[in-house]
Image (cartoon, rainbow, N blue to C red):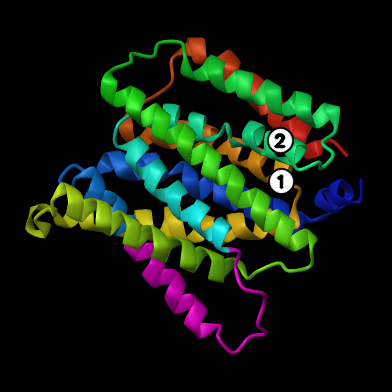
Amino acid sequence: MAEVQHATLDRSGLTAGLIAAVSWGMTGTFVHLVTTASPGMITVCRLVVSALVLSAVAMLRRNEARRPAAPWLAVAAMAAYYVFATEAFTRAPVVEVTLLVGSSPLIAVCFERFMGRPVSRVRLVGVVMAVVGLAGFVIPGSRYSFTSIIGDVLALAAATVSAIYVTRLRAAASAGNAPDGIAVAARATIMGAIASLVLLAIRGVDSLSKVSTHDWWVLVLLGAFSTAIPTVAYSEASRRLPTTVTTSLTLLTPLFAALFAGFLLGEWPIAARLPGGVLAFAGICIVVLRQ
């Protein structure tokens, strides 16, 4: 109960979670705006830019009080999240991928229950409502192909490692070993950049000259605005809030993603999907606001 009460009082944690949701909401739109780079190149550029930004910030803060080292399982999980999610966005519609990635609260609840931590029935009902709403949003009007199915599978993989990330960071915070959010984010993006470079080398390195100037700027924005900023914000939310609250806040990301994709890409969701979106939003409210 003490943990839940802390979450309702920690406005900084809630604000950080909302910042992460808004910033991640632009990810799919940025990816779809890039037309001259391959999926592997997009992943590499995204993570390299983020790693450079976060490493520079970490160096400027090196004289501050040291915090415990980042849990490496959490770092590896966040690195894998960015590789899986970016690859998913290159294969399936923006809102669909974002909604599937948003299923991480249900996975996180399963982790919490497996580790013997109490999860109130009301919050559990809220998470189930949210996930059912996500399904109601994704299924109507969907046209599946082999490529889009692979994208959906990668999105679910991203949701799983996201749940592992937030669970491990919350466990460290509860034990009094909360790591620095910027250090966690920097290490995660560096690890992800190395992994994505290896994958790109296996696939075959692209010619950088083929990437347009417009796309280079989009990739920079993708790395800074939709990777570096939300990773730091999500790390802060993860150590300040209960796991179910943090992961449920990310369910707001699909709503922002739908707006961004609609205005900038013309990918507006069909009317049949709206009831599912309303149900998902109601589930979020229950999880976040329930004391």
* Residue 266 coordinates in the image, percent (x, y): 33, 28
> Which residue was labeled with disc 2?
109
Q: Does the magenta stretch include residue 61?
A: yes
Q: Indicate which disc residue 273 carries.
A: none
Identified at 56% across, 83% down, the residue is 61
257 relative to 74, above or below: above
Q: Is residue 268 at least partly visible in the picture?
A: yes
Identified at 60% across, 43% down, the residue is 163
Q: Quarter of the image containing the C terminus?
A: top right
Front residue of 173 and 275? 173
In three-dimensional space, the C-alpha distance between marks 2 and 1, rounded to whole angstroms, equals 8 Å
Apparent side of residue 78 relative to residue 170 in the rendered image (left or right): left
Across and down, in percent, residue 237 comes to 67, 55
Q: So how many labels did they put on this image?
A: 2
Which image quadrant is residue 91 in?
top left
Image height of 132 relative to 74, above or below: above
Please give the name of the residue rendered at 39% of the width and 58% of the height, measured from the top-left corner: 192
Please name the residue shown 50% across and 53% down the image: 78
- Mark 1 — residue? 243
Q: Residue furthest right?
A: 1
